[in-house]
């Protein structure tokens, strides 16, 4: 028997692998998607989402990609895995993702073919969106200048392509490497940690998707999860996954605050205590 069987779950509810079935549409995620869709639909050219590690940027990017209906949008998602990518690599990757075939070696030729492809998509009545996850890895002025050049491709209606950057807060500093590009940011949104009530709703939502009809975490356990995770979804998942395993090993049908305390200690997570007030006498 494992914890899935012990808690009557069909699958792991707190995996950190992005799975849109477990997507929980918080108020801020809903607002972010509305703003980003506005940027794409009105052909603004550049939108930016920033947030600390684990706040759900990748989840949001995948959700947005899924919501861009192929009948009305030509959309692609690029994930930047390292900081050594060149502007040439980026240009070729964007062109390939948007359907440019038989890429030429000359940068000028690639730009020409990409423009023709974007114009054809526009004439076909579709909007183009390129979502770039981990955009803070694009750490050169040359790459920022390349994006500015791509945003010069326009129609009378607006930009022929809208880029949506998802990245850590340092992305804002990288945009400043090319001030004209920074000034072209039409929409910006910052993802924040979840509030305690939203943390509880998030936990219960994921449990329901995994097949749980009953609450497994006590209210005090949820409070402790929020305290130790500081509302960061990735940490919430890690704590809750370990808590289910710990609860199974202890044969506890309900995960309580004590289990969360033990898990937090094992994971070396610090409790955020209020500062001690000192009074002069």
Image (cartoon, rainbow, N blue to C red):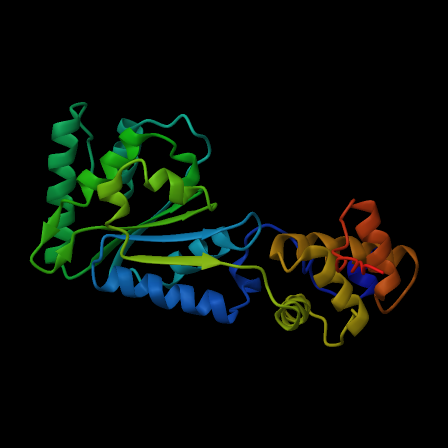
133 w.r.t. 33: above or below: above
Q: Is residue 167 left or right of residue 277?
A: left
The residue at 63%/68% (across/down) is 202
The answer to whether residue 224 is visible is: yes
- The residue sitting at the top extreme is 105
Residue 108, x across and y down, in percent: 12, 29
> Which quadrant would the N terminus be assigned to in this image?
bottom right
* Between 36 and 253, the one nearer to me in the picture: 36
Residue pictured at 82% horizontal, 54% vertical: 245
**Residue 111: x percent and y percent?**
15, 35
In the picture shown, does residue 165 fall above or below 112? below
Q: Please give the name of the residue rendered at 48% of the width and 53% of the height, measured from the top-left corner.
A: 57
In x, y percent, where is residue 46? 27, 51
Question: Relative to residue 154, is residue 65 drawn left or right?
Answer: right
Q: Nearer the viewer, residue 55 or 270?
A: 270
| 175 is higher (above) or lower (below) than 200 | above
Residue closest to the far front: 281
Residue placed at 45% from the left, 57% from the top? 190
Q: Nearer the viewer, residue 19 or 60?
A: 60
The residue positioned farthest toward the bottom in the image shown: 214
Left or right, 28 with respect to 256, comes to left
| The quarter of the displayed image where residue 110 is located | top left
Quarter of the figure that contains the C terminus: bottom right
* Viewer-proximal residue among 4 and 91: 91
State how many labels appear: 0
Above or below, 144 against 19 in this view is: above
């Amino acid at each position: 028997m494992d914890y899935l069987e012990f808690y009557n779950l069909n699958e792991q509810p707190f995996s950190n692998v992005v799975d849109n079935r477990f997507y929980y549409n918080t108020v801020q995620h809903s607002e972010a998607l509305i703003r980003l869709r506005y940027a794409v639909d009105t052909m603004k050219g550049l939108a930016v989402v920033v947030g600390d590690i684990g706040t759900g940027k990748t989840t949001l990017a995948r959700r947005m990609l899924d919501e861009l209906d192929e009948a009305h949008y030509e959309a692609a998602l690029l994930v930047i895995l390292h900081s050594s990518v060149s502007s040439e690599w980026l240009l070729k990757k964007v062109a390939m993702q948007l359907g440019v075939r038989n890429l030429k070696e000359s940068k000028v030729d690639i730009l020409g073919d990409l423009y023709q492809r974007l114009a054809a998509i526009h004439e076909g009545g579709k909007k183009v969106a390129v979502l770039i996850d981990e955009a803070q890895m694009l750490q050169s002025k040359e790459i920022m200048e390349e994006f500015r050049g791509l945003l010069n491709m326009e129609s009378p209606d607006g930009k022929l392509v809208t880029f949506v950057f998802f990245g850590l807060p340092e992305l804002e500093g990288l945009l400043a490497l090319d001030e004209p590009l920074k000034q072209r940011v039409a929409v910006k949104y910052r993802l924040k940690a979840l509030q305690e009530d939203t943390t509880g709703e998030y936990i219960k939502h994921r449990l329901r998707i995994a097949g749980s009809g009953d609450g497994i975490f006590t209210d005090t356990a949820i409070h402790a999860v929020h305290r130790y995770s500081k509302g960061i979804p990735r940490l919430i998942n890690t704590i809750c996954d370990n808590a289910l395993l710990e609860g199974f090993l202890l044969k506890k049908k309900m995960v309580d605050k004590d289990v969360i305390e033990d898990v937090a200690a094992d994971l070396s997570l610090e409790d955020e205590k209020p500062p001690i007030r000192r009074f002069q006498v």
